[in-house]
Amino acid sequence: MTLTISGSALVTGASRGLGAQIARRLAADGWPVAVNYRSDRPGAEKVVADILAEGGRAAAFGADVTAEAEVPALVAAVAAELGPVQVVVANATGPQPLAPAAEVTWQDHLNQLTFFVKSPTLLLTAVLPGMRELGTGRFIHIGSDSFERALPGASAYNAAKGAQLGLARTWARELGRYGITVNVVAPGWIPVERHGVVTEEDSAGYVRDVPLGRLGRPEDIADVVAFVASDASRFVTGERVTVNGGHTID
């Protein structure tokens, strides 16, 4: 089945960072892009302005994608303005505090599961009728190589990322019959605004273990997401594509 652009792409948490770059990249490929934000409206509007300036089509949509009452309304608003949602990039995330195992609470786990299991579940429930009607769709989770690296202090985050992968693989089996693919794009360390200023000294230890010899950039992730959203990935589903310069090669 050839994927044609007959709907829109919804990128959650797209007012800055990876989400903003992903939104711009999908728009460059011709997708009408819904730039979702929770509180950073100026950031989202700047992303939309950038897309419009390049001749693309986009609009900003404020919604908390972890809130059961807000996600259906978000998807309906996107469909009304840009067309039915054909691509979802589940990028939105929250704080990721580090804590040793002895101090991790169940609430810490719930906080991470809210973004990486609850939010995608709400999004899929809302977009699935439209994707089934179109006969095609792409659901793309933004994961993390932290799951493979098993970073100490990040047990709640890593456990949620593991759950995210299980969710994606199971959905891929269930939804393939409808022409819908489900994949995970898993970045390594990609410094963005929330990381503040990252100096060469700060990153030297990390870069030493990266075969390609540099930190990742947001466009590295956006290009892979664009591939997964395109017809070029038509026979790829249930996969986790790690984008980290080879940092986790066994």
Image (tube, helix red, strand yellow):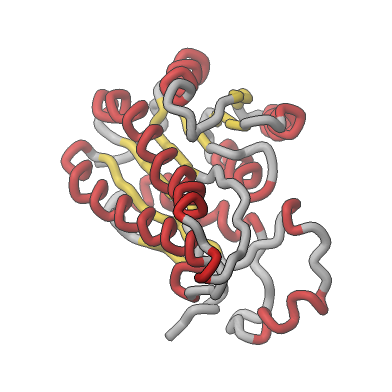
Q: Nearer the viewer, residue 172 or 125?
A: 125
Quarter holding the C terminus is bottom left
Residue 63 image offset from top left, x and y in percent: 56, 26
Residue sitting at x 66%, y 79%:
206
Residue 144 image offset from top left, x and y in percent: 50, 62
Relative to residue 174, is residue 24 drawn left or right? right
Residue sitting at x 49%, y 79%:
248
The answer to whether residue 56 is above or below residue 224 is: above
The answer to whether residue 245 is above or below residue 124 is: below
Any part of residue 83 in sight: no
Relative to residue 59, is residue 32 drawn left or right? left
The residue most toward the top is: 80
The residue most toward the left is: 177
The residue most toward the front is: 102
Any part of residue 242 in sight: yes
Total labels drawn: 0
Relative to residue 61, is residue 205 drawn left or right? right
The answer to whether residue 235 is above or below residue 210 is: above
The answer to whether residue 158 is above or below residue 14 is: below
Residue 207 image-quadrant placement? bottom right
Residue sitting at x 64%, y 66%:
216
Residue 131 image-quadrant placement? top left
Relative to residue 198, is residue 33 drawn left or right? left
Residue sitting at x 61%, y 64%:
98
Residue 180 image-quadrant placement? top left
Residue 54 image offset from top left, x and y in percent: 70, 33
